[in-house]
Amino acid sequence: MMIIIIMIQQFMNRERELSFLERKYEERKPHLLVIYGRRRVGKTEIIKKFIEGRKGVYVLCTRDSLKENISEFKKKFYEATGREYFLKLDTESLGDLFKFLVEELKGGKFIVAVDEFPYLIELEKGITSVLQKAWDETLSKTNIFLILCGSSIGMMETEVLSYKSPLYGRRTGQWKVTPFTVREIRRAFPDKSAEEIVKIWAVFGGTPYYFLQMKKEASVEENIKRKILTKGEVLYNEPLILLREEFREPRIYTLILKYLSLGYVTQGKLQSATGIEKGNLSKYLETLKETGLIEYILPLGKRKRGIYRVSDPFFNFWFRFVYPNLSDLELGLTEQVYLKISRELNAYYGEMFEHLIIEALKQKQIKIKPSYKQVHKWWHKGEEINIVLTNDETHEITFIETKWKKLSMKEALKTISNLERKSTKVNWFKQERKEEYGVIAKEIMNKETIQGKGYIAIDTRDMVSF
């Protein structure tokens, strides 16, 4: 019963993805679609939901061998057509299999969904050329609806989507499946307060596989104890499992994520802490960026000396609080570990609240005037401004401070006054810019009065709809 509930919730907020597939399916032409995104984000469920009630097959590729994968295609094509000869075909060519399939379909609409396509590429580098030939010579002249799906974002973008790929120019559409926004998480937890929704995102992130493990009636903190800090639960060592699935050198990536979570956020500090040679470290960091696990942040006005951070909330939480305490957790000391980390949770929520606001602003989910086109951070010689919004064309700039606390009107105005002081050090169109200031907090008292003074004042109660 639990599996059914999870499936329903995952599709509550995947209307755009399903609508895209439906729209393409209604077109009277062959399609080669690329669906990709991080592991656990829900790609497979979307595809399976789309196939329901339609003629087609779903093939999950594995790392076993090319022969085993071809055997799986034969089996699926046999099950779909009822033609037993597919099982006996003396060929290891995917192109040949598609030719036989097309003959059986006789022009009818048919879906072939190939999941974890990068595994085939790993086993046979020339598989994209084989598929390109099959598309050009056969499939493009049929009513086929071919979906190539993958979790390895880097490989999907370089081996399937890039102009160097044999498949370049053949695809008829692509969709990158992304984690849920806070607005979509709210729809999954309609009875939770805005503050609780922020906490859910801060700990579990927008990956449905993660936040749907939660026990709904329990608090976020109780779910941390039950679902993350308890040995045997699926989230207990999920990051280590995913790193082993995703990378050939999981130990190296674990080491990097460990030190990033400990505050070694520049490449120089990471190099000293990990002992990884500079050139190799750059490659590892770039790979982690491609998977969406980390990001590189430059302060406004700078082209270097930026910092790295673990951008996926669940990985950030896990490497910050779980990984350093695995020895105690293995002994079943869940309560003791929770008591230790609970002292840091509020500060962690505050840090993640800032990043949540940045993401919401990038996605235009918070209404702020004047209009802005870029979202930045700024820091210099010990001074920092959480968020700076700019418009290079109009020279408008907005300075925002985030606070994970309840602010009185006096505290909010003091925060804005301090922001005005720090803004004088920001060297951006200094002589010809129009400035705005504001604060975004967990709660702000008398915020209408602050807004009446010409400042931005937003709290989590305003974010219920985002």
Image (cartoon, helix red, strand yellow):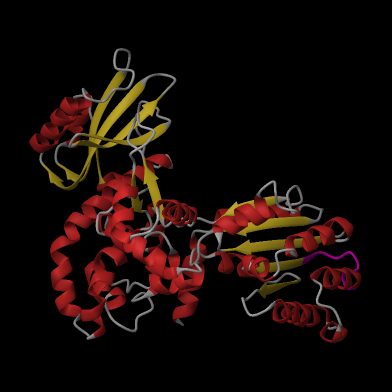
Let me know if residue 21 appears in the view: no
- Answer yes or no: is residue 85 visible: yes
Relative side of 48 to 180, left or right: right
Q: Residue at x 89, y 58 (%)?
A: 137
In the visual, does 377 lie left or right of 244? left
The x and y percentages for residue 102 are 87, 68
Query: Residue at point 16% right, 61% down?
Result: 344
Residue closer to the observer: 18 or 260: 260
- Quarter occupied by residue 370: top left
Magenta region includes residue 109: yes
Q: Nearer the viewer, residue 161 or 16?
A: 161
Label total for image: 0
Which residue is painted at 37% across and 57% down in the image? 186
Q: Is residue 363 left or right of residue 86?
A: left
Relative to residue 389, is residue 43 depicted above or below? below
Which contiguous range is marked in magenta? 104-110
* Residue 452 drawn above or below residue 122: above
Q: Residue furthest left?
A: 410
Residue 334 within the magenta-colored segment of the rendering: no
Q: Nearer the viewer, residue 456 or 355?
A: 355
Q: Quadrant of residue 26?
A: bottom right
Q: Position of residue 357 (x, y in %)?
A: 32, 45
Foreground: 27 or 167? 167
Query: Residue 462 location in percent, x, y?
Result: 29, 44
Residue at x 63% of width, y 65% of height: 118
